[in-house]
Image (spheres, coloured by chain):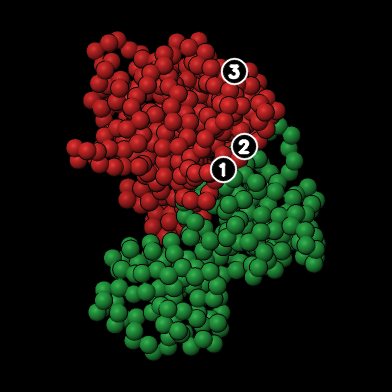
Chain colours: A red, B green
Amino acid sequence: MAEAIPPGTRDVLPEEMREIRAIQAALLSSFAEGGYQEVRTPTIEYAEVVERAEVGDAGAYRFLDDRGDLLALRNDMTVPIARLVSSRLAGEDGPWRLCYFANSFRPAAPKRAELREFGQAGIELFGLGGLEGISEVLRVLYGSLDSVGLDRAVVGLGDAGLWSGVLEDLGVSPPVGAQTSDYLRRGDLVGLEAVLHTDGDLAREEVDVAMSVVRMRGGIEVIEEARSLTGEACAGPLDRIESALGRALETGGGRTVTVDLGMARELGYYTGEILEIYEPAVGRVVGAGGRYDGLMKGFGLDVPAAGFSLYTERIHEARLEAGIDG
Amino acid sequence: MADEATSRAGGDDGLTLAVPRGSLFGEVADLLDAAGVDTAGPRSDSRSLLFEAGGMTLITVRPSDVPTYVQSGAADLGITGKDVLSEQADREVVELLDLGIGPCRMVLAAREGDPGPDEHERKLGMMRIATKYPNITNSWFAKRGRQVEIVEIKGSVELAPLVGLADAIVDLVATGRTLAENGLEVREEILESTARLIANDVSYRLKAREIDSFAARLSEAIA
């Protein structure tokens, strides 16, 4: 008798399982090469811990346990590992280099071919800030992409502080600014422009500048162009992107790197550089990461943090498309 | 370095655009012609759904399916109404451009002069609404602290208040003729909609130059 499984979940049969294990083994050895040690955290956490990610729309499965405590299935691995470091390793000297292979859970709309349980493989680097930290993350990322054969993968670079810099330069009030950030996060550039026009208290040319910055994607030239259009508050974020781009091109061994000045992740914890990983054969982002220096403060340990996470199923899909697996 | 940094790593097979069939199609096709895209294929009576148009691939799909094709990357770009995008607000796509065509309004409508909806809202604390747009309806009323019971209908919703299935409807209105012919009147405006150009998240970055140049051609064609 055929019994159903809940939508958004899946069984993995032996052939695919072998391929996924091979991906994980390759990633684990490239993480280990970079000095990253594997850890595991519980599948369920207190809901208040999961909520530190300020995930917004992504959501989480919450439930009461037998004692009446509100728990949640983890919807991301960065927050649980931040919790682990702050509560278990705080007495030791950093930096801490940890990696993980785990499934996370997020609600997904039905009939969208989206997974509610999905695999993640990634690294977390705590206690090494600035360019040094992000360079190390990029180095491990490229090593990882090489190890699974994704030589067409493209790294995208942005900065979580750039849009607030644009708003600050233009003198947009914080409440309107917060509204515009929501539009940016959702990728609604039409709505973003409309809000700037109606509520931003800006001249037409100022709106045009903001919109042209946010639409800029390309190489080093877009950073220079943005510098010529923006003011003091954007200088820091643009410098960060330029430095990260330099390192990415250096360590990427001729791979494509693309700068996106309008990049904004759904997860609210990013504070500096943001990374996205694209694969031409896969229509969705196959991995993401960046810097989240503020996250640990919420756990009472003031150290910088950065890392990345690859979505295992999408990495497998990319390998199938490229003819590496299957 | 700039060139190298933006070129696609893999083979570039041009852009795929999801074009909406139905009432929006004529205006979209005219706009595409003006932007230099050959729409002879999709305009013909052919049963085909996929057409080559001078370096671009056009696929014709239902307007409400456009975000599905674009989010998955099956199409790099798509054109559909803001009503569709608002109804599927959780879609991860980039909304690039307001094309200004296909203007229409999402409204709350009821039978002309019928006190039923207001009375139900006052006495029962809620209204029953038939709609093809449950998400838009739900969020519009929830934001205003008003309770509604939603009946999802796939076909002509105008019928629902006439036969007592619902107190009112939330539906898209272009000219208002269908409402008038069924003895319905607009009670509240919910949103204004026009057609939008949307892009897949990954294509938006990996095919940035091609997408920007296509969007610029469309902008010029509108102006």
Instruction: Name the one closer to the observer, A203 or A69.
Output: A69
**Residue type pointed to by label 1:** Asp
- The chain holding disc 1 is B
Q: Nearer the viewer, residue B63 or A264?
A: B63
Are tags 1 and 2 found on a single chain?
no
Is B35 left or right of A141, judged from the image as shown? Answer: right
The image quadrant of residue A149 is top right
Q: Is residue B169 above or below residue B97?
A: below
Residue B75's x, y, as percent?
65, 48
Residue A147's disc is 3
User: What residue sits right under mark 1 in the picture?
Assistant: B201
Q: Residue flagged by tag 3: what amino acid is it?
A: Ser
Q: Which mark is residue A282?
A: 2
Q: Which numbered disc, 2 or 3, marks the residue that appears first in the sequence? A: 3
Examine the image and state in which quarter residue A215 appears: top right
Location of residue B110 in the rendering, given as x and y in whole percent from the top left corner = 42, 82
Q: Residue at x 41, y 16 (%)?
A: A38
Q: Is residue A157 above or below residue A216?
A: above
Callout 1: SS: helix
Mark 2 element type? strand
Question: Which element type, helix, strand or loop, lies under badge 3?
Answer: helix
